[in-house]
């Protein structure tokens, strides 16, 4: 297979002059910011090496940020969860290895432009958000609040006008240049949709056609699924035709990285969007109960991490953007997973 068709046979990038980022410093006294953790010389050196190799292409981060257990890793001291949720992003974004974050709260309810703008004001110009489209347009089923029990078909599922009004336009207006990726994570689909793949592709085709004209140049659209049977050449062809990225979703419901590579190869070349959500063999609540307060790698997954690092390196070496976000439920602590990924990429 020719190099341009192979995620793992790409040439090394040309040497670039190393940037000169300074070491992370505490915020100025009285500026209202939270205290960031001391990054240390080793991780600072890793961040500088990755910047020298990949320039501005590589962005890694976590799923949300409001975790008190990250003190010493991201926060300089322990803060309340509510404080971190409101004001933690500035300290988070000062870590040189945390250059993006998955805005998961937007999945549970649509956010207004002012809410997005308040978050964008906490980060620098080089930071980018990965925004999850709300479940009100990505879940084919209307669910009971609290229990999540399926109640009835969702009339707004992948509806273009609803998605524009409740999702894309507020995010674009509020986040501006800090909008990196808008991810449509399809919740597990009922048989009514799984048994009619052509109808689902038509619905997606109409959605991308409506959204793309209003998408800023620097931003990406991505599709993440939770049903392995949707990973077909037909879906890859549709996404590639629109320039929408397939989101590599690492989750208990989905195949391994290696088994999802055919989708990435079918859409090559292009950006990598990956969300490492949940280690295989676990359920979310089970992982939460076992891993909280998310301050250590309670269940290291070096094999999965190594596969992911290979895909990241191949994509960035070919000159394409990379957005990778990691959940605490992947290995036990999302920041520590990012640090290990960064070390592996640097090596």
Image (spheres, helix red, strand yellow):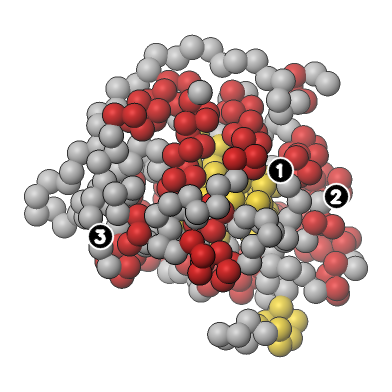
Q: Is residue 258 left or right of residue 12?
A: right
Q: Is residue 96 above or below residue 157?
A: above
The residue beneath circle 1 is 257
Q: Of discs 3 and 1, which sits in the foreground?
A: 3
Residue at horizontal 18%, vertical 43%?
26
Q: CA distance from mark 3 to mark 1?
A: 35 Å
Q: What is the residue that sits farthest to the left in this orientation? A: 29
Q: Is residue 237 left or right of residue 326?
A: right
Q: Residues within 10 Å of mark 1 (few under 14, many from 20)?
A: some
Upstream in the sequence, badge 3 or badge 2? Answer: 3
Upstream in the sequence, badge 2 or badge 1? Answer: 2
Count of numbered circles on the image: 3
Q: Nearer the viewer, residue 299 or 115?
A: 299
Give me the disc on residue 78. Answer: 3
Residue at horizontal 59%, vertical 28%?
313
Q: Mark 1 falls on what kind of element? A: helix
Whether residue 173 is visible, yes or no, is no
Image quadrant where residue 309 sits? top right
Q: Of discs 3 and 2, which sits in the foreground?
A: 3
Q: Is residue 5 above or below residue 238?
A: above
Q: Of discs 2 and 1, which sits in the foreground?
A: 1
Q: Mark 2 falls on what kind of element? A: loop
Q: Is residue 279 left or right of residue 105?
A: right
């Amino acid at each position: 297979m020719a190099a341009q068709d192979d995620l793992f046979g790409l040439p090394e990038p040309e040497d670039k002059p190393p940037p000169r980022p300074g070491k992370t410093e505490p915020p100025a006294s009285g500026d209202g910011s939270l205290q960031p953790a001391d990054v240390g010389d080793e991780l600072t050196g890793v961040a500088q090496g990755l910047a020298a190799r990949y320039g501005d292409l590589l962005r890694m981060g976590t799923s949300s940020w409001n975790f008190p257990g990250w003190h010493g890793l991201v926060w300089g001291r322990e803060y309340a969860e509510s404080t971190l949720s409101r004001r933690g992003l500035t300290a988070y974004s000062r870590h040189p290895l945390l250059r993006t974050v998955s805005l998961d709260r937007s999945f549970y309810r649509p956010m207004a432009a002012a809410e997005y703008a308040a978050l964008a004001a906490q980060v620098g110009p080089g930071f980018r958000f990965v925004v999850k489209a709300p479940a009100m347009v990505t879940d084919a089923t209307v669910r009971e609040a609290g229990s999540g029990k399926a109640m009835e078909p969702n009339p707004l599922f992948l509806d273009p006008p609803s998605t524009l009004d409740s999702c894309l336009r507020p995010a674009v207006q509020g986040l501006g240049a800090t909008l990196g990726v808008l991810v449509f994570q399809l919740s597990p689909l009922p048989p009514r949709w799984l048994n009619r793949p052509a109808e689902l592709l038509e619905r997606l085709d109409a959605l991308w056609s409506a959204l793309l004209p209003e998408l800023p140049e620097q931003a990406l659209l991505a599709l993440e699924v939770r049903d392995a049977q949707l990973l077909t050449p037909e879906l890859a062809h549709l996404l590639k035709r629109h320039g929408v990225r397939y989101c590599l979703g690492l989750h208990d419901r989905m195949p391994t990285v290696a088994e999802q590579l055919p989708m990435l190869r079918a859409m090559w070349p292009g950006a990598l969007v990956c969300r490492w959500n949940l280690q295989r063999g676990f359920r979310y609540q089970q992982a939460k109960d076992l891993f909280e307060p998310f301050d250590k790698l309670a269940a290291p997954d070096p094999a999965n991490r190594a596969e992911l690092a290979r895909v990241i390196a191949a994509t960035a070496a070919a000159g394409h953007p990379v957005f990778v976000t990691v959940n605490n439920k992947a290995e036990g602590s999302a920041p520590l997973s990012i640090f290990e990924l960064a070390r592996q990429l640097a090596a």
